[in-house]
Amino acid sequence: MSCNGKKGGEDVDFGLTKANEEMILSLIRSGRIPHTVIIEGGGAEERAGAATLLATGAICKEAERPCLSCTACRKVLAGSHPDMFLPKPSESLKTGILSLKELRDKYLSGISVKPNEADIKVYIFSEADKLLREDAQNALLKTIEEPPQRLLFIFTTESAKHLLLTVRSRARILTLSNKELTDEESTEAARSLIAGIVSLYEYDLLQALFRLDDKEKLTAALTVLTEKLRAALGFYSGIRTEDEDVKRLTRKLDRGRVIALIEVTGDTLGKLKTNVNMQLLTTWLCSQYRRLTWQK
Ligand SMILES: [Zn+2]
């Protein structure tokens, strides 16, 4: 994700699909992050990325959280924020299991101590079903049931079912979804959009758009479409192309119209990151494309 256009910010890749990133961000922006969150589904790396994103959102104090560029964000991303804890068994124990004693001595004993720099303390129990045996999960229960102010527990696991029901039942479960369009599907969808844009019949475009009925699909297709539109722009500057989709665009549209289409597509990609009504957005986009393509 980008850093809200802020200066000095860098792009940080959390390894998440747009939809999964959006799910975490909307939880952060709701301002109501629960005390205990279980992140399940996806691959282990995606879960880790989601946990880090959620942690930056909880710890960052900027208005647009997470900004990913303030000192706090950078510390979280580097894994060095004093209020973020990543419980792990000590190196000497090769079991990968955090013992009850270690959990108590190293982590639980200081749990009600106020945060150092942030307004909250965040504990990420990574792959918690493997890290914490039943006794350790039970030991966490008391805190989960009556959490001190400003505390966030994040558990990642392949499936929340692998954790104790008592833990699970008190947590907000976020399920990462795997359904991202393949590159081929996105290209195919973008091709239908182009056919719709240059078609005489508005219906063709509407149909192509309505097939992209969730944010993720539409985002993927519009991203490919943008690439094709940019290639079309290159064509007007003398860059040859063998791409049939691009040729199709350049046969129908002049340079000014292509630029306008890139702009409106960019606006739409921005709107897709917000809590937008898909049907209204699709209808709006269709009318914009039609207007820009066909107006004299
Ligand atoms: Zn920040």
Image (cartoon, rainbow, N blue to C red):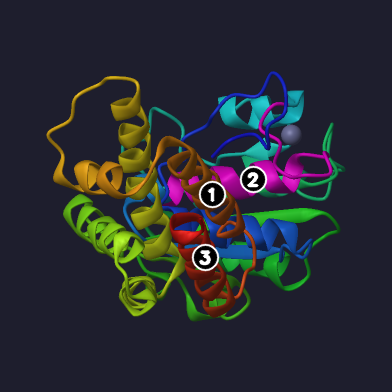
Ligand 1 placement by image quarter: top right
- Label 1 SS: helix
The three-letter code of the residue at mark 1 reads Ala
The numbered dot on residue 285 is: 3
Q: Is residue 264 magenta?
A: no
Classify mark 1 as within 8 Å of ligand 1 or not, answering yes or no. no
Q: Where's residue 9, x and y in %?
A: 65, 24
User: Which quarter of the rendering shows the N terminus?
Assistant: top right
Q: Is residue 116 left or right of residue 37?
A: right
Dot 3 alpha-carbon crowd within 10 angstroms: few under 14, some 14 to 19, many 20 or more: some
Report x, y in % for residue 101. Answer: 56, 48
Q: Residue at x 17, y 30 (%)?
A: 241
Q: Is residue 149 visible?
A: yes
The reply to whether callout 1 and callout 3 are in contact (CB within 8 Å) is no
The kind of residue on which mark 3 rests is Leu
Residue named by callout 1: 51
Q: Label 2 near label 1: C-beta < 8 Å? A: yes
Where is mark 2, residue-wise? 55
Q: Disc 1 to disc 2, how far (Cα)? A: 6 Å
**Vertical placement of residue 141 versus 75, above or below:** below
Query: Left or right of 114: which side holds 28?
Result: left
Q: In the rendered structure, which amino acid carries the disc numbered 2?
A: Ala
Residue at image point 34% right, 56% down: 221
| Numbered range of the magenta stretch | 47-69
SS assignment at label 3? helix
Question: Do we see residue 180 in this rendering?
Answer: no
